[in-house]
Amino acid sequence: MAILKVAVLGNPILRVPAEPVKNIQAPEIQRLIDDMIETMREYRGVGLAAPQVHRSLQIAVVEAEENPGAAGGSSRPLTVLINPRILPVTERMEEDWEGCLSVPDLRGRVSRYGEIEVQAQDRRGRPLNLRAGDFFARVIQHEHDHLIGTLFLDRMKSFDTLTYPAEYARYWARPEDEG
């Protein structure tokens, strides 16, 4: 396995819709998935999409808590999503903070659906259908955006909350965010 180079804001690959994966079982696809997982963990991310590592393919890996910082927050297992489709379960939108490995050192508030249904294939090519809520749903939507050439900055209603991590900690962070 290898740590991959992450594409950052300005790299054209981040703005191009990714291609569907046709041969999920191909050794190079399986190796890419393993490398993406290792890269996400190395940079302490909670998700990573293939375009972020210079591969225009519809693959995302997610490893996030259902509700971080809250009492009773539950961990979700590592989830590999290939050729995903996202369907909102509710019209309820929730605004919260996001950052991105491809937009280093910036955070901002983004509105996302509070609950979604995901239809995808897993890393073995089997159908994967799941419901996600809260932070887990936010991360999946963020990674799905990478697959369609969209960044969290594009989803911000206003840049009033766009901030560097030190300023976020100083002016914006809630006590439960610090844990």
Image (tube, rainbow, N blue to C red):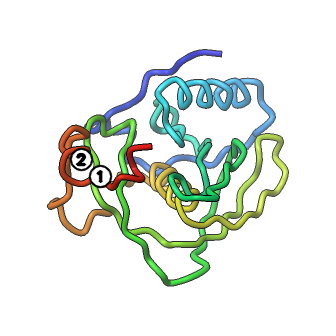
Looking at the figure, which quarter contains the N terminus? top right
**Three-letter residue code for mark 2:** Tyr
Query: As rendered, which of 39 and 121 lies closer to the eye?
Result: 39
Place of residue 13 in the rendered image (x, y in percent of width and height, measured from the top left)? 39, 38
Q: Residue at x 44, y 77 (%)?
A: 93
Q: Is disc 2 in contact with disc 1, using a CB cutoff of under 8 Å?
A: yes
- Describe residue 28's horizontal placement relative to residue 103 as left or right: right
Estimate the spatial distance between the alpha carbons at disc 2 and disc 1, rounded to whole Å.
Answer: 6 Å
What's the amino acid at mark 1?
Ala
Tell me the element at label 2: helix
Tell which residue pokes out farthest to the left in this image.
Answer: 160
- In the picture, the disc for residue 168 is 2
Q: How many marks?
A: 2
Residue 133 spot, x, y in % from top left: 60, 67
Q: Which mark is residue 173?
A: 1
Q: Earlier in the sequence, mark 2 or mark 1?
A: 2
Quadrant of the snapshot with the C terminus: top left
